[in-house]
Amino acid sequence: MSVPDASRHAVRVDPRHVMHELMTSAVARLSGCIRVEIQSDVVRLTGSTGSWHEKQLAQECLRPVCSSMRIQNEITVPAWDSDQPVRPLR
């Protein structure tokens, strides 16, 4: 039984799909539900996370991967977006 020679088989890789997978895995470790969308030269982050820090971290995780693209961070942080007044620290 012979094993097919892998060098004779062409593999087509969709760079957009690969980039999307890379970006999605980069933010997957953060808590919350974050979605990554690529639209021409814009990477759009949507969903929600538990803190402002995680919102910024999601954005910064993508910078090395998409240096030539603009990042549009639309992630919400429910604690920050609530209508509750912020109490001053004492």
Image: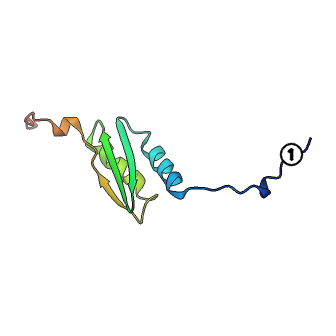
- Residue at 54 percent across and 58 percent down: it is 15
Residue 9, position as x, y percentages in the image: 75, 55
- Residue at 7 percent across and 35 percent down: it is 85
20 shown above or below 41 = above
Residue that lies at the very extreme toward the bottom in this rendered image = 68
> In which image quadrant can residue 82 be found?
top left
Q: Residue type at mark 1? A: Val
- Residue at 10 percent across and 35 percent down: it is 83
Position of the C terminus by quadrant: top left
Q: Is residue 63 left or right of residue 8?
A: left
Residue hosting label 1:
3
- Residue at 17 percent across and 39 percent down: it is 81
- Which one is nearer the viewer's eye here, 36 or 54? 36
10 shown above or below 87 = below
Residue 41, position as x, y percentages in the image: 38, 63
Q: Is residue 1 left or right of residue 85?
A: right
Position of the N terminus by quadrant: top right
- Which one is nearer the viewer's eye here, 2 or 22? 2
